[in-house]
Every structure is written in structure tokens, then in C-alpha cells.
Image (cartoon, coloured by chain):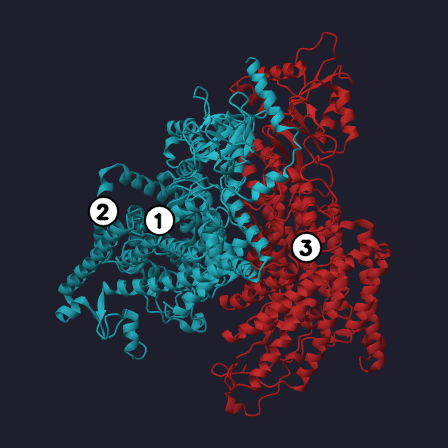
Chain colours: A red, B cyan
């Protein structure tokens, strides 16, 4: 450190002046291509500037700033002419219009999927003679007979009946079995082949990826039109194939695809990654809204489970879009009952405080099952990822489909589709109900126990005992098959299988409680509220609570789940049981691991997702997380002036960093700004092509005023325009938990670390995630992308 | 700038080393009283350190950091002993326990308030002979006659009947009138005197102040026990006095008081301002939950309207507390109908798409009324603030109460309480309904139009026309009186009066539509869906939509309002009309001014509230907002070493700043940390008292290692412990919108501005608010507090 150094410092001091220099010139430049304003909001001078590469993380602050500049521009222009004013108004309402379109499109698609899946599911059992396009129910509607069993009519022929003429006997049974197997294999084969051939992103539920995208990650094509088309088709196929999967999760993906595609109609949303993510948050709400017919629950699902940045404006718009979608779906009326909701239930009896004990038991079961399922599923997915199994997805799907079909056909509760099963389990038995689950013995002493109360608790009959056995087998089968099904290369949702598991468990417990109450109505527990002839236990309610508990254990949703269930029943009456079960389930499951299934899949795939919920509780400082680490080569920085184009290019080539801090000088390391690698590359490239005299020896400057150069030097290249003049900084002593908070809340991509005004290092989102993984004793290299 | 300066710089460079110094020693200190860790989490060495003064803004980051330190401490200790482990577990569940207590207490209080207000409202009309503590309804319950008019029974005597023996004739009427006036004046006098004498904070709705408190402001005593007691009592008095005010808003204040008081039971919440605000957010949800019996709506109200920082954990807890409160209230059963909700409505007819036109009209009316009301009310409150009117609050309240009583007694729709009026307006007329509003002509050709449909549209009879006139007068009166009532020195909510205005307007329009449809059922509009004898228009639904629209116009709530209404009816059916009306209402009202009534009152009172909703759209840089401005004296800073205690004290005395940046040296202005004025004062005071040899000539140092001092110098005072080593900084070029975003999202109190690593100035929340006020052409000095 000799005189040269002091000289340099002196120059800098003079350059910086007293801090009260005139900012007006800078501000003027800020309106053009100045700081934070990398691209002119309405035209793009250098194509690609300010955009992102695939598998990279966006900078929320930059995106929102860009949008505000655009908005300001439009507002300023609107004072000039009527056309510009109209443009401003249309711009203001474009968000609502977009929401309307998303709601309409997603509602229509969901209706189509429902109808198609219903028809194809029935196709596995037989065909309608009046027209093959009718499903079982519609087919029997046209045959207008008086009250009969819903699913028996001459028009509908099972395959054995159609071929051999009879549906009786072992041969017919085997023939139907084989046809069922055939269709299941065909559908699942088609599904997996289509996914593999046209849109690999169409597989799975899509929610982990959507969570990651909403947190600011770029996965090009994940929400594209091919994904939409293929996912819609293969979803129908996968659901119809009888695999243990649901269509509710993928519907969220479908709705997000719709939103993403419709975003292209509006410049505001097409060009801004942050604004587009607001629309996608709303689309997630739309997805759940159409899946369950629960608009409020959908909005809360988006808020609680999926979204990262959820301002109030998005809340309003989500709600609007969710309503539009729900009403579109209702107009299509795919369930044929003009109900909005997937499972409409109406219970007649209130619940008693004592019943909280079994409800909490169901919560514990749900939590245990959730934790177990996540572990088993992740272990299986890891095997798929790391062994040869992953190379044969088609064979895997076919094998699982065959296994599912073979095992599930003989048991009527596994043969029926997941949502039918749940509907039946939620159902409250009336006296006239012909379902096996309502196979109670008719009370002999009807007059004694009160004829009026047709829903009184009754002893179980042999039919019900058979049903219970079948349900128990179905429970075990569903629990096992779901583990290996979720994560295969077909669209697969987890809501319905999880709910089915819980509903079976709940119904079993409910019937058990009912019989206990019936035979022990004098015991201390039941005395007083469960006299003979009273309808005191509703097994359907237990099924519902169980379904909520299991879904809660797997996904760790609470409020949104309760609200969805509340919208199904439409009564505040059952919120307390649901709340008790979901909360217990969440606590129990959290005790085994804080991650829900979606977070676990995000981690499995190594997405850079910074969980907004979890409290980060560790005692380290920013300096421990930042790069360069002790012993690493010094931080790669650019200087404000003095570097040539060639030097900059070789620096870019020799490193893989996504951005470079700009400092006053190598010696002082005082931070001036931050430049992104991509912007730097594009700008230099562009300058070399278009700007005269820019050669490798040209000086790259980031200053406001060009430095005086020797007369024979090539013209300098001023890149101040692409420099972010307001990079985020923290001091080296900032605790890491505060740093993580800043990353989460502001949606940063990177943050610079300073000590007493000098640049020390840089922290990227990936560094934070790696540090968190390290603390949790996980492999820090499991975080894959940038 | 001579050699001295360079010498200094050199020393600093050496001091700072290469940035890779050993941080372990610092981190060790971080666990004690080190950076961000001003107070040891479990014991407080210097009392007052790290607390706030009244009317100051908290630093969210510091508070949350404190809580994390505390949590970490407990977690670490829990590994040592079983007692500590139990402590950890109890600590983890204390939040839930607190929520349970808040729910129970607020639910019980709300029940008590309901019962008391009901009784005292009836007391204005008469007294029960069986027992004066019975209200009118209960009094007539005890008199067990068969079906009769609900409010006629011999046990209940009106005052004239009690005194003169008859309730007939002009004399009796005047006597009742005078008694009504007497009670109204007595109640309002008691209310205003109690508020003035014991708890001035108990007046108003409390929501503006709670919003401000939740955003991080300190108002000591605003949520204290005196406020709670006095507010509860005076709320009952104010509501019973017949003034045009509701108890729903103040219930939010009452619930928050409960929460704040219960927080004192748990160290975690007592000592941490940020954690306490999480509880208060949940309490706001509880308040609405008990006010309307709408737990989900309450949670969304807290999220949409009141809260500032609403993490998911708070969402779950709010929901839990809101449920507990709602069920506590239901167990108390103040409405005597075991309904959870304040206005239970059940409509039978669906709505038709054509009806959206009148619904949107109601939305426009609501928006206009909202905008008008806010302007008029704020203008009136400003008059009260600035003129002599404000000096006589008791006389003002008595005058308004007298005026209200005098005008409202003759009109039965203004005489009844606001919530009774709304109930009646929401009600759907059945054939047997004896209400004046159902005074339709009995269809002569009953057989023709179909007897089965008892709810068919019928022509209005003379009784209904009278009712309509009375309603129109009531509308005008309510609209005017509410403007001068809201803001008086009594507890006053705005929900019920706003809803009443909307419900009257809606009912008028609804009856109008009904008659239009009845007489023009062949016109193009009504043909096809409104044939004679059909029940096509439900005036009660119009009243409900109108109520939502007016409330939305005044408060600018949307989703939470729709959800509250949805919980009242329990059907998704009417969400679209409600949504259309509230959205229209919000858009129309926003066109006249973006502020809701609560924000307007916050501004009127000059609270430092940084609106989290509004998009801040202005093109200035951090350097324009920061202090010191150009021409101001230089920023008051402390140096890391070299200042004496006396110098520091004189700096504190000569300025009024709440904190001082610490820099390396006056010349280099490189930022080291930030010290709060209060902490500095307390620490110096404490050191002078307790530490030997600390005199005015002692050096104050903020360094890690004590500098070498001449042997005769007094011992230095090291204050590194109270210095925030990680102050937030932005560069001078940061656009102000990003700065505002940082302030909002991180909940900052101040932020330092740097240029190329040198400290330039400071921005406080107040500076930001002043700047925003300036841009909006308002007086920047209207922001009063710190």
C-alpha cells in the first residue's frame, strides 16, 4: 500500500464529492434506461435485456419496479390524449378481465374433464346401447322407469352381457374382470405415453413446481400450451384407469396453465414475471375452487399452501376468479345435480362434546398416516430417481395399473372411483338407503324406539359387517398403492386418495362408535345424550373428519381445509370437529417432520424454494453464509472504470456467477452497483455488433461522466445503464435469520455483504438454501438450480 | 485533507483487516449482549433497554430478532434438564393457550354486552313487572300464552301504563316519548362522562387506532384494563341510548383489549411488541367473529382490513380463537335462538341474471354514500377538532342524543335498534308475517295463482306503502345523523348504521322491483322468469345486498364482507350478487378517494401509519427523502471512538433524533452501526451510577477491542453492546417506491442512506410518510408522532 493507493483514494473522494451532488441528472437518466430501470417500460432497446434464463430465480424487487415504471409511464401519457387515457383505463381493468377469462376457461375445462372422466370410468364396466357417449347414469336416465336401483337399466350393458349375453356366472365375472383390466391398462398406457412423448412436465400433481414457480423460479414450458393440452387429456385417462390418484391437484396445474397462456394476451402480464405470478396465485385458487366447488376454500388454499407473494389485490382477484370458475362449472353441471360442490353432505344430528375424543383420535391417525406416507413416498421416489427403475416409466405405470386393477376389482369399494367412494362414505344413512354401508338391522320394536326418528341408531346387520371388512381391506390396499402411485409419470393428485384413506378410517371408527353407543347407551359416556332411539352418532361425519385429518396430515393444510369442508356442508356446526382433527393431525405429523408432501417433493427435486412459513432459527451471521468463503479466491468484482471489454469478457468466461458487484476500485472495494451476467453479455454483444469502435481494448465504464482517455484509445463502452445502482446490502454482522427474512419478504435473488462500507462478499438465494440444508444435516448440494 | 486524514484511513484499514477476520469472538458476544441482541433474552441487565417510549414506532426486525434469540435460548436450555424441556413445550403451546383464553374472554364479554344492551334498550320503552332484569322478550316468555304478537304481554308495562295505568291516548304517548328521551339522555350522559373521566381512549370505534398499533405504533393504555372496563360499560350505554351507532366495531377494540391484558400472563408476549401484535391481529378476528357470528369472515376481516403483519401462524391462531369465541358466544346464547349469527336469513328463491342490474345500482349507491359519508364525517370531525365544539363533548353528545331520540321516536323504523331494523329488513315475507313490511294484499284469486306458492309476489297494500314512506324518512335521517354521530366521545361503531342505510335503500329498491315485476310480468325483462304467482323477487335479498354495498363503500372491505354475509346466509347462492355490489361499491367509492373511513381517521389524527395496500407510485429517489436535506446541518453521528461521554451527552441534548449512526470517523463517514437515543441515555445513566470512574471526560467507544489510552485517562465506556451492528441501508439511488416497500415489508423504523459505502443520511418512517403526504398535496406536518 504505497502512494499509488492513497492517490487513488483521493481521486475517488473527489469523484464522490460531498454526497450532495446534483441528483437531477441522475434521476433524468433513471427515467430512461437508468438504475432499476433496465429496460424502457414500453419498448425494449436491446432484446433480452432484463429477462431471465430457464431454471433461474427472478428478482421480485426489479420486476415490481419495472411494473411501477410502466404504470407511471402510462399514467403520465394518459394526460396527453384520449387514446392514452383509454389505454390507461383498459390497463387498469385488464387484471379483472384476465381473471374473468381464467375463471371461464378453467371452469369449462374442469367441467369437460369431469364429464370425460366420468364416462371413461364407466366405460371400464360396460357401454350404453342408446349411445356409447352416455355414461352409466345418463344412460339409465334416458330409460325412464320409476324408482329403481340407480345403476340397473336394460340400456346399459356390461361387457360380459354384451358379448356373451349374460352377466351371471363365473365366466361373465372373469370376462368383466379382464375387460376392466384391459381398459385400465389401455388408459394408463395412453396416459404415460402421451406425457412422455409430448409434455414431460404434465406428470405429477404439479403443485410442488407451482409453489416453486410462484416463489420466483423460472421453468419454461411448465405452464405452456402443450402441458395444458396433454395434462388435460392424460388427466382424464389417468383418473379413468382406476389408479389411486385424484384430479384435484392437477386441476390446480391446469388452471395455472390457463392463466399463464391467457397472460400472453396482456402486455402487462406477459412481460412481467412478478405480475404474472400474481395471476398464477389466483389461478391456484381457481383450481381448488373448481375441484371441490369451494371458492373461499380455494382462495385460502392459495394463500396458505401455494402462494409466496399474496397482496390484497390478489386476494380480491383470486376470489373473483374462483367465483367465476365455480359458476361456470355449475352451469356445465357435470355432476348432474346442480350442486356446486363435489361431495354434498347434509347431516341432521348435532355432535356431542364426548365425540371430540374419537375426532382427535382420527386427527392422530391422520397425522401418523401423513408422516408415514411422506416418508415412504419420498423413499420410493428416491429409489425411482437413483436406480434403474426410473428408466422404465411406461413399464412402471403399466405394472402399477395392472396391480391396482387386479386387486381393486373384486372389492366394490376399491373398484369404484375415489370420489364416488368418498361420497358414499360421507353419506348419512336414511331408512330407505339401499347401500351396503346402510345395512343396519331394521329395529323390531319400531314403535318402542319411536317411529318418527327414522335416523335413530340401529344395530349393524350382516351386510354392514361385510362392508366393514371390505372397507378395512380397501384401507390397507389404498394406503399401500398410493405410496407407489404418487410420483409416477402420469398426472396424479393426492387429495382424493388421502381423503379416501381418511374417510374409510373415519367411517370404520364412526360405525364402531355407533354400535358402542347402541349397545352401551347406559354407560357413563353415553348416558344423557345417547338414549335408545336417538340419532346420536353420524358415521358420515366421522368419515368427513377422517378425510380432513388425513389430507391435513399429508399436505399440512389447516384453515383452507376446514373451509373447504365447511363449504361442502355449508354449516358452521361441524367446524369444531374438523378443526380439532386437522390441528391434531398437523401437530402429530409435524412432530415427525416439518415438511408437507409438496415441500418434500420440492426438496427431492432440488428446487430453490425458500419456505415462507418456517421460522428459521439458527445462530449464525451473514458472514458465515456469504461467498467467497475463507480460503476461496477473492470475490469477482468489476471496477467502475479501468477494465477493458476483453478483461470483462475473460472475467465472465472464467467464472459462473450470475452477477458481479461493481466497486470504486479493487483496493477500496467500495460498492457502487451490481451487474447481472446475462445483461452484461447481451450488452457487450450488442455493442460489439452495433456500436462503432467497440473492441476488446475499449474501456468499460460504469460512471456517470466518461473519464478522460488518451486520444488514441478506442471509444469507451458505458454500461451504467445496465447497472443496478441500488443493490441490497447487509452488514457482515447481520444474523442469518434476519437475512433470510429479507430474502423472503423482498423476494431477493442476491444480497451483498459489507463491513464498514467495504464490500466483503455476496449471498445468493442458493447460498441461503445450502446453508439451511447444512444446518438441517442435509446435503447442501441437493439444491440444484440457481 | 492532509496527512492526518490519510493516517486515519490507514489506521482504519488496518483495523478492519482483510474482511476475513475471526468472527467467532464476535459471535460469542452476539449470544450475550451483542449485536441485535440488545438485551439478554431471559434477564434484563439494564432496565428499560430495548423498550419504547409512548407514541413511538417499534422496530419489527429488532423485536422479531429478540424473540428468536429468546426461542433459541429456550431450545438450547431444554437439552439440559427436564424442567427446561417442559418450559420449552409450554412455551410452544402458550400461543394456543393464549388464543383459547382470548376467545373465551371475548366471547363471554360479547355475550354480556349483548344481553345488557338488549335489556337497556327495552328499558327505554318500559319495564317488566315479574322482574325488572328481564328484557321485553324474556318478560313475555315467562308469560306462557299461545301464539300472540311477540311484544304484547300483560307483564310488560310501558312507562305510561305503569304510571297512568293506560297506554292509550295522546297523554300516554307523550309520557312514553318523554321517558324514552329521558333514558336516552341518561344513558348517553353516563357514557360520555365515564369515558371522559376514566378512559378517554374508550371513545370511537377503535379500529383506526388498532390498525395503527398493529402497524407498529405504541399507544400506551389504549388496550389497557381501564379502557376495557370503561369501553364495555359505555358501549352498552351508548348502544342503548338509541344513538345511531353499532357495537360491532368497538367489539374489535374490546377483543384487542382482552388479548393485550391476557398477554401479560405470558412472558413471551408481554415483553415482545412484535409477538404481541400477532396476538392482537388474531383478537381483531375474534372481535368480528363475535360481532356477527362469522369466524371465517372475522379472520378475513383481520387479514384484509386491520392487520399489518399476518404470517400463516397467525392465520391458524386467529381462526382457532375466532371459533372459540363464536362458540362461547353461542353457549351464552344472547339472541335466544341458538343461532351463531347476528342476522340469520334464509331465502327461498334463487336470483335471476337480470337482477344483477339493480344489484349493481345498489353497489353504485353504496359507493356514493360511502364516499360522501367519509367526506362529510371527516369535515365534521375537523370542525370538532379545530373549533370550540371540541371543548364541549358532553354537551355535544347530549344534543345529538336528544335530537336522535326526538326525531326517531315517532318513526318505528328509527325507534327500534339498528340490528333489529336490519333483521327486519333482511327478512323474507311469508304469508303469515304480521310485520308492516309484509303488508301485501292477499291475492284474491288465490286458486288461480297457485296456493302452494305461499311466497308468490303480491301487490303491495296500504300498510306496505306506509312502511315505505317511513323507511324513506328513516333513510334520510340515518344518513344525516350518522355523519355527526361517528367520532363523538362515546364508543361508536359504524357497521350497523352503514348496513342500516344500505338495507333500507335495498329494501325500497327490492319492493319497487317486486311491484314492477308484478305489474309488468309480460314485459321483455320479466317474461320467462317472473310469471304471475311465482316468487321471483326477494326484497330481503336486496336489503342484504344494499347493506353489503354501503358497508363496503364506507370501509372498502370486499372479500371479508362477502364472506361475513355468506356466513349469515350459509349459501353460496348469493355470493355473486354480493360480490357484484361490493366490488361496484368499492370501485365507485375509490373513484372519489382511495381512503376508507378508517384510513381517513388515521390521517385526521396524524398517526404514522404506512398503508400496506396502496401502491406507491412516485418517481423520486431515497436521496430526496432522507435527512439532512440540502442546506441542513450535517447528520448527527457518533464516531466509533474518540468521543467523550460529555460530548455524546451534549450531542443528545442538542438534537431530538431518536437514534444516531456510528461511523468509523467523521472524515470517512463509513457506517459501523446504529444506536438508539433511548438506549444511549439509559446506558450512560446506568454507567455513571454503577460503573466506577465513568465521568464526562471518559471516552465512549463502540469498538470490539478497547483502544490504548494514556495512563491518566479515565476508564472508557464501551457501548458496543447497545449498538445495532446490522442497520439497514439503501443507496442514495434507490427509488423511493422500493424504499417504501422495504419499510412496509420489514417493518423498519429507520433506514440509513449510503453512497459508495459512505453514510449520507437517514430516512425514518415519518420522513417517508411526510414525503407521501407532500406528493399527495397534503400538509406534511399532519404526521404527528414518531
Q: Secondary structure at mark 2?
A: helix
Say what secondary structure mark 1 lies in: loop
Residue B641 position (above or below residue A500) = above
Quadrant of the rendered structure where residue B129 is? bottom left
Give whichever of B23, A655 is nearer the camera.
Answer: B23
The residue shown at (50%, 68%) is A573
Secondary structure type for disc 3: helix
Q: Is residue A7 above or below residue B442?
A: above
Instruction: Determine which residue is flagged by label 3.
Output: A598
- The first of marks 2 and 1 along the sequence is 1
State the quadrant of the C terminus of chain A: top right
Q: Mark 1, residues whose alpha carbon is within 10 Å: few (<14), some, or many (≥20)?
A: some
> How far is the residue under mark 3 from the one under mark 2?
60 Å
Query: Dot 3, crowdedness within 10 Å: few (<14), some or many (≥20)?
Result: many
Dot 2 crowding, Cα within 10 Å, few <14, some 14–19, many 20+: some
Residue at the spot of label 1:
B221
Chain to which mark 2 belongs: B
Relative to residue A428, is residue A655 drawn left or right? right
Whether residue A257 is visible: no
Residue beneath disc 2? B396
Tag 2 near tag 1, CB within 8 Å: no
Q: Tell me the distance, in whole angstroms, between the alpha carbons under discs 3 and 1.
A: 45 Å
The spot of residue A587 in percent (x, y) is 59, 62
Amino acid at each position: 500500500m504505497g502512494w499509488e493507493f492513497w492517490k487513488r483514494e483521493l481521486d475517488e473522494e473527489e469523484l464522490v464529492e460531498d454526497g450532495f451532488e446534483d441528483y437531477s441528472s441522475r434521476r433524468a437518466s433513471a427515467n430512461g434506461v437508468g438504475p432499476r430501470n433496465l429496460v424502457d417500460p414500453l419498448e425494449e432497446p436491446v432484446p433480452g435485456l432484463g429477462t431471465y434464463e430457464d431454471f433461474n430465480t427472478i428478482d421480485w424487487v426489479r420486476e415490481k419496479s419495472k411494473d411501477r415504471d410502466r404504470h407511471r409511464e402510462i399514467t403520465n401519457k394518459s394526460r396527453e390524449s384520449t387514446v392514452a387515457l383509454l389505454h390507461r383505463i383498459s390497463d387498469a381493468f385488464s387484471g379483472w378481465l384476465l381473471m374473468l377469462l381464467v375463471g371461464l376457461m378453467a371452469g369449462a375445462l374442469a367441467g369437460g374433464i369431469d364429464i370425460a372422466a366420468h364416462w371413461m370410468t364407466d366405460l371400464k364396466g360396460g357401454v350404453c346401447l342408446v349411445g356409447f357417449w352416455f355414461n352409466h347414469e345418463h344412460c339409465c336416465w334416458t330409460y325412464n322407469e320409476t324408482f329403481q336401483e340407480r345403476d340397473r337399466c336394460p340400456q346399459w350393458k356390461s361387457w360380459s352381457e354384451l358379448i356373451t349375453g349374460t352377466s351371471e356366472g363365473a365366466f361373465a365375472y372373469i370376462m368383466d374382470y379382464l375387460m376392466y383390466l384391459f381398459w385400465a391398462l389401455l388408459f394408463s398406457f395412453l396416459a404415460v405415453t402421451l406425457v412422455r412423448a409430448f409434455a414431460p412436465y404434465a406428470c405429477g400433481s404439479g403443485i410442488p413446481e407451482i409453489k416453486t414457480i410462484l416463489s420466483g423460479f423460472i421453468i419454461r414450458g411448465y405452464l405452456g400450451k402443450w402441458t395444458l393440452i396433454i395434462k388435460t387429456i392424460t388427466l382424464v385417462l389417468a383418473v379413468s384407469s382406476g389408479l389411486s390418484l385424484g384430479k384435484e391437484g392437477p386441476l390446480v396445474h391446469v388452471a395455472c396453465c390457463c392463466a399463464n397462456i391467457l397472460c400472453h394476451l396482456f402486455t402487462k402480464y406477459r412481460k412481467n414475471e412478478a405480475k404474472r405470478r400474481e395471476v398464477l396465485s389466483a389461478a391456484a385458487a381457481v383450481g381448488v375452487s373448481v375441484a371441490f366447488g369451494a371458492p373461499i376454500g380455494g382462495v385460502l388454499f392459495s394463500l396458505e399452501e401455494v402462494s409466496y407473494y399474496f397482496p390484497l389485490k390478489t386476494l380480491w382477484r383470486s376470489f373473483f376468479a374462483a367465483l367465476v370458475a365455480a359458476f361456470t362449472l355449475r352451469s356445465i353441471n357435470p355432476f348432474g345435480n346442480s350442486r356446486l360442490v363435489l361431495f354434498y353432505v347434509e347431516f341432521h344430528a348435532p355432535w356431542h362434546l364426548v365425540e371430540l375424543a374419537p375426532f382427535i383420535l382420527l386427527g392422530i391417525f391422520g397425522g401418523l398416516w401423513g408422516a408415514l406416507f411422506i416418508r415412504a413416498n419420498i423413499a420410493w421416489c428416491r429409489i425411482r430417481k437413483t436406480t434403474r427403475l426410473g428408466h422404465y416409466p411406461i413399464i412402471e405405470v403399466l405394472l402399477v395399473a395392472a396391480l391396482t386393477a387386479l386387486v381393486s376389482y373384486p372389492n366394490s369399494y376399491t373398484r369404484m372411483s375415489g370420489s364416488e367412494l368418498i361420497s358414499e362414505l360421507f353419506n348419512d344413512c336414511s331408512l330407505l338407503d339401499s347401500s351396503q354401508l346402510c345395512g343396519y338391522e331394521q329395529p323390531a320394536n319400531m314403535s318402542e324406539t319411536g317411529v318418527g326418528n327414522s335416523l335413530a341408531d340401529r344395530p349393524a346387520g350382516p351386510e354392514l359387517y361385510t362392508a366393514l371388512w371390505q372397507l378395512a381391506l380397501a384401507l390397507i390396499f389404498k394406503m399401500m398403492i398410493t405410496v407407489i402411485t404418487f410420483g409416477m409419470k402420469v398426472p396424479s393428485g393426492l387429495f382424493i386418495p388421502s381423503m379416501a384413506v381418511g374417510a374409510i378410517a373415519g367411517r370404520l371408527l364412526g360405525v364402531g362408535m355407533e354400535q358402542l353407543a347402541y349397545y352401551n347407551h347406559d354407560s357413563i359416556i353415553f348416558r344423557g345424550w345417547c338414549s335408545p332411539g336417538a340419532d346420536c352418532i353420524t358415521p358420515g361425519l366421522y368419515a368427513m373428519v377422517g378425510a380432513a385429518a388425513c389430507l391435513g396430515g399429508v399436505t399440512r393444510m389447516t384453515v383452507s381445509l376446514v373451509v373447504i369442508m365447511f363449504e361442502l356442508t355449508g354449516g358452521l356446526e361441524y367446524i369444531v370437529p374438523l378443526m380439532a382433527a386437522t390441528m391434531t393431525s398437523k401437530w402429530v405429523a409435524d412432530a415427525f417432520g416439518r415438511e408437507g408432501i409438496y415441500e418434500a417433493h420440492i426438496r427431492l427435486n432440488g428446487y430453490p424454494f425458500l419456505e415462507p412459513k418456517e421460522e428459521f432459527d439458527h445462530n449464525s451471521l451473514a458472514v458465515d453464509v456469504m461467498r467467497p468463503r475463507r480460503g476461496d479466491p477473492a470475490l469477482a468484482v468489476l471496477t467502475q472504470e479501468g477494465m477493458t471489454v476483453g478483461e470483462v469478457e475473460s472475467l465472465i468466461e472464467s467464472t459462473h456467477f450470475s452477477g458481479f458487484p461493481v466497486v470504486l476500485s479493487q483496493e477500496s472495494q467500495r460498492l457502487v452497483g451490481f451487474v447481472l451476467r446475462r445483461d452484461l453479455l447481451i450488452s457487450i454483444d450488442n455493442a460489439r455488433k452495433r456500436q462503432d469502435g467497440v473492441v476488446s481494448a475499449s474501456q468499460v465504464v460504469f460512471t456517470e461522466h466518461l473519464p478522460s482517455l488518451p486520444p488514441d484509445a478506442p471509444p469507451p463502452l458505458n454500461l451504467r445503464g445496465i447497472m443496478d445502482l441500488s443493490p441490497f446490502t447487509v452488514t457482515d454482522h447481520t444474523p442469518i435469520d434476519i437475512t433470510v427474512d429479507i430474502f423472503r419478504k423482498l423476494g431477493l435473488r442476491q444480497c451483498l455483504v459489507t463491513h464498514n462500507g467495504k464490500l466483503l462478499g455476496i449471498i445468493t438465494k442458493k447460498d441461503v438454501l445450502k446453508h439451511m440444508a447444512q444446518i438441517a444435516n442435509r446435503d447442501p448440494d441437493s439444491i440444484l438450480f440457481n
